Image: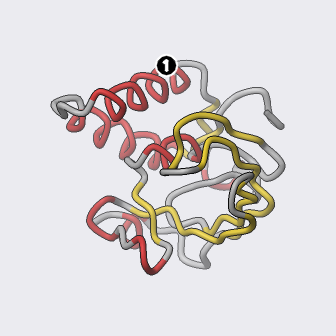
């Protein structure tokens, strides 16, 4: 891990914690395991102000270029659950892959049950949107 811990912007951290708190009622065992893993990692995360955020950190609305070990290069956008659309490459922050990516940096490698048929990927690049207001992130 490039920065030795997850890095999150303060407002995004609060929003993510709210999503996770609402998600604990799921009955999907794998999903609950992903939530627990992310919740544990968040205990040690660096929480920064917007102006302190490194540009290569995966955040809400980031476009991430991934090298999926089993299927090659793929580009995805990390979005709130209501805006997810697999066909358009928009993955929910609450998907197993979304929870594995948030707060990580370009160059980081991730292993686990990420998406069907993929157990390992590397973050090749991260692009941030121009508008970082919470209005563009939230519902």
- For the residue pair 68 and 9, the one nearer the viewer reads as 68
At x 69%, y 39%, the residue is: 110
Residue 115 position (above or below residue 87): above
Quarter of the rendering occupied by the N terminus: top right
Q: Is residue 103 left or right of residue 132?
A: right
- For the residue pair 121 and 1, the one nearer the viewer reads as 121
Quadrant in which residue 86 is drawn: bottom left
Residue 77 position (above or below residue 44): below
Where residue 68 sits: x, y (%)? 70, 56
Where residue 126 sits: x, y (%)? 72, 63
The secondary structure type at the circle numbered 1 is helix
Q: Is residue 109 left or right of residue 58?
A: right
- For the residue pair 96 and 15, the one nearer the viewer reads as 96
At x 38%, y 30%, the residue is: 35
Q: Which residue is mark 1?
A: 40
Crowding near the residue tagged with mark 1, few <14, some 14–19, many ≥20 C-alpha atoms within 10 Å: few
Quadrant in which residue 67 is drawn: bottom right
Quadrant in which residue 6 is drawn: top right
Where residue 38 sits: x, y (%)? 48, 29
At x 79%, y 53%, the residue is: 106
**Total marks placed:** 1
Quarter of the rendering occupied by the C terminus: bottom left
Q: How is the image coloured?
A: secondary structure
At x 36%, y 60%, the residue is: 80
Q: Is residue 99 left or right of residue 6?
A: left
Where residue 117 sits: x, y (%)? 55, 50
- For the residue pair 133 and 23, the one nearer the viewer reads as 23
């Amino acid at each position: 891990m490039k920065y030795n811990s997850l890095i999150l912007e303060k407002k995004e951290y609060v929003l993510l914690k709210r999503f996770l708190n609402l998600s604990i009622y799921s009955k999907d065992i794998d999903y609950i395991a992903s939530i627990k893993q992310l919740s544990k990692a968040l205990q040690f995360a660096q929480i920064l102000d917007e102006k302190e955020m490194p540009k290569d950190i995966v955040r809400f609305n980031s476009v991430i270029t991934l090298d999926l070990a089993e299927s090659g290069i793929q580009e995805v956008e990390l979005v709130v659950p209501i805006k997810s659309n697999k066909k358009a490459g928009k993955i929910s922050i609450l998907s197993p892959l979304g929870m594995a990516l948030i707060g990580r940096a370009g160059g980081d490698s991730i292993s686990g049950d990420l998406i069907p048929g993929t157990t390992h990927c590397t973050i090749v690049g991260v692009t941030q949107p121009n508008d970082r207001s919470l209005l563009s992130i939230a519902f």
